[in-house]
Image (cartoon, rainbow, N blue to C red):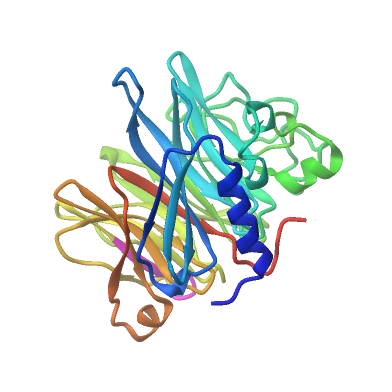
Amino acid sequence: MSILSEHKKHFRLLIAACIFALGILTLPASAVCAGEFLVYSQESKCPDGTPSRKIMIASMSDDGVTTRGILSKEGYRYLSPTIAPSGKMVAYSRGSSGKALGIFLQRLDHLGNADGDVVPVTPMNATAIHPRFSGDSTMIAYSTDEVDSTNSADPADPTNPAGPANPAKPTAQNTRRIAIKNVKKAEEHGIALTSAPVQYIPSEFPAFEPTLNFDGSQLVYAVAGVGGRYHLVHVDLTTNTQTRLATRGVSATMPAFSRDGEIIAYTYKEGSNWHIALLDLATGESSPATSGPSQNQGPAWTSDGSLIYTAALDGDFNIHLISASSLHDGTLASELLFDGEGRISYPSVGGNMEHAFP
């Protein structure tokens, strides 16, 4: 896989400048992901022994994987990170004792700077988790319990700052919905992201883990339904039409759009195990991508159509990969990308796209 040389130079400068460094580790890797970045959340501990979580970034090259901690501040928990497919921004949930989890955004070339360069996306009086970028890196979706405000967007034009109040209100059964903001439009209009127009997606039950297609016109998210079982819902944002997707197993969650928008990878439960399945949106058919005794969760796509996910067995957490060619020919051969060294979750890949955030 090719990549512009300045991306490699950019990452080396990032590592040199990073003041949140928690140690570097280089591991073998498949060349299939060479040139891309991967972020994930890893369990850690504060100096006083209090459990916490930090965000790690991995640079993948033909020579292996170099991992390094990039976001870790005492007293804070960093969760559900996502990297823009352009490779230029990282979004994540951050919270601390007595403070709700909120969504924050940071550009990769600002990681070595002070907290003043951390951009809040959501208001401080609400809880927000599971941020995900659209494939073109211009929009961000997340799960939140925030209430409607004067910056609610016009459902017909979620980028319109003057749009009327969105009719999607919390219900008695549900106070958590999916929200969508246009990062690029807010920047162009000089609007702070906390005040940027919001499009809320109505849901009868609590909604989590959104994923957007390339241009942000299609959304899939997980719903916590009756009995604690999750199912997936597809939303055509051009018509506001919602459709429940037929999935495998007794529970389905953690959806991820493929880069071409044709396939949804998701995590499903079968018996006592969690596995990854692939859902063809055109046919509605699902097929398993993983099997075996390990707990496989959190699928993410690379730019060439390979699949990355977390595999846990006997307390050992690793990042595995199924190449695009193996997915295509049906062999589904899984290979170890690298050992996560601790409890890890929510891998996200970016940095090797033709369409970069301007």
329, above or below 212, in the image: below
Residue at 75 percent across and 26 percent down: it is 150
Residue at image location 26% in from the left, 67% down from the top: 290
| Magenta-highlighted residues | 276-283
Report whether 38 appears left or right of 321.
right
- Pick the residue in front: 108 or 119: 108
Extreme residue toward the front, this view: 16
Q: Residue furthest bottom?
A: 329
Q: Is residue 241 left or right of residue 64?
A: right
Q: At 61% from the left edge and 72% from the top edge, which residue is drawn?
A: 3
Residue 306, quarter of the rendered image: bottom left
Locate the C terminus and report the quarter of the image it occupies.
bottom right
Asked if one can make out residue 303 in the rendered structure from this viewpoint, the answer is: yes
- Say which quadrant the N terminus sits in: bottom right
Residue 282: in magenta span: yes
Q: Position of residue 53 (x, y in %)?
A: 38, 33
Q: Position of residue 285 (x, y in %)?
A: 37, 72
Q: Nearer the viewer, residue 301 or 212?
A: 301
- Magenta stretch secondary structure, dominant: strand
**Image point 69% across, 25% down: which residue?**
149
x then y, percent, for residue 57: 48, 49
The answer to whether 358 is drawn above or below residue 167 in the figure is below
